Amino acid sequence: MAKIKSVFICNNCGTTSPKWVGKCHACGEWNTYVEEVVSKEVTQEEKRRPWQGANVSQTGPKPVALPEIKAGSIQRLVTPDGEFNRVLGGGIVPGSLILIGGQPGIGKSTLLLQLALYTDARILYVSGEESEDQIKMRADRIGGDPSNCFILTETNTTKILNHAQQLGPQLIITDSIQTLSSPHIESMPGSVSQVRECAGELQRFAKEMNIPVIIIGHITKEGSIAGPKLLEHIVDAVLQFEGDQHYTYRILRTLKNRFGSTDEMGIYEMQATGLREVSNPSELLLSQKDDDLSGSAIAATMEGMRSMLIEVQALVSRAVYGTPQRSATGFDLRRLSMLLAVLEKRGGFPYGQHDVFLNIAGGIKVDDPAIDLAIVSALISSLEDIAIPTNICFAGEVGLSGEIRAVNRVEQRIQEADRLGFKKIYISKYNTKGLDLDRYKIRVQTIGKLEELYRDLFEE
């Protein structure tokens, strides 16, 4: 009989300990250790020499020289959802395991059920959180063709994989990994051992049957995917579905992708009938206003291979409550402090005596350094109370010495601004190498320092 023992496993990183400890020595988190019952029976000889006496199957995989491997073309499963295909690098790769995480109620189940209803393929939708009636109500609201979508409300992984083998679907969707349980593990569903074992069984089934599997994962209060980090390591792609409850748009980002780029982003708009693809993100990220107001500037940014224009809003007011406040929504607060220091040191602007509030319109989060030039322009515009014309946009990085540095893919930024009808765009003069400015209708203004920007934009 196998010797039964229990260990303590960290819920955050999966580190094991023979006894309970308050703080994990690996990740530093507090109160994350839970007790798990494991069974293990290994002889002393197996521990000392595990390679001797091993039963190597004649039909199992063997070492193969790399030149002998014939690489075949991967036929991806292309869905009708263009944004989903973009994020995954062109479609779903057969045999891949995809993990989607996001906040509760953000629309993960709606996104995947909509994908199942509109994709022309046999899909098995496994739900451990909702009943068949609840899924039917959502499907009626979303619409689509339900003839190829099969619903299974089950949490036992053995039964799920048996049904999948009999049905032979082209795609399996599981909602969610925290509700599944394996009969080989005695712990409760959602525990570290169960999540690890269930994910491993789904991965083996996906690779052996060459059927892609999409699983939904819960997230913690910090925003990371719940469960051990091993879950993110064994899957082929990790997608983050995010958004603000106060806005209708949703963003699908790639955190990991073995078959494509990790810089892509898909944008959706939540509607009563489901999620609508947003092929032109600028329609959501540019506010509609008739009057020119100070403190507003348009930035030409890049998300992966997609160029889009977003609005930057700044408010600078004299500090009357002691220490000046610094607040940024959708932008790194430390980088904002750096830009304010550059403006005060190189430009002589008294931002140390003013409260500064920065907001990216629409609530989107931007990490592109090319937004620096638009932020600096919005800050100066609000301080001087001079409005920037709405037909002007910016693309440039600001250095510590006040220089305007070059940014990548400047041609795509200029083309997007030209397509949307902008009349003028400010870029770095170091971006003009190999750039044909005469083929654009938009006027391209090159600058090298913040002083040139101020003279050209605010002293006209």
Image: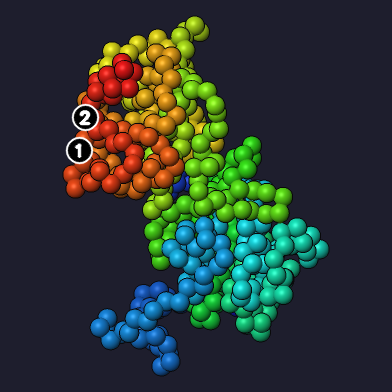
Q: Which residue is mark 1?
A: 430
Q: Residues within 10 Å of mark 1 (few under 14, many from 20)?
A: few
Q: Which residue is mark 2?
A: 448
Image: 261 above or below 299: below
Q: Quadrant of residue 372?
A: top left
Are discs 2 and 1 less than 8 Å apart at CB? Answer: yes
Q: Amino acid at mark 2?
A: Gly
Image: 205 above or below 238: below
Residue 60, how many percent across, how many down? 42, 88
Q: Residue at x 47, y 12 (%)?
A: 317
Q: Residue at x 41, y 16 (%)?
A: 386
Q: Residue at x 46, y 9 (%)?
A: 319
Residue 62, how many percent across, how many down? 35, 86
Q: CA distance from mark 2 to mark 1?
A: 8 Å
Q: Amino acid at mark 1?
A: Tyr
Q: Secondary structure at mark 1?
A: helix
- Report the side of 68 relative to 143 (left or right): left
Residue 340, how many percent across, how many down? 35, 21
- Report the side of 99 relative to 60 (left or right): right
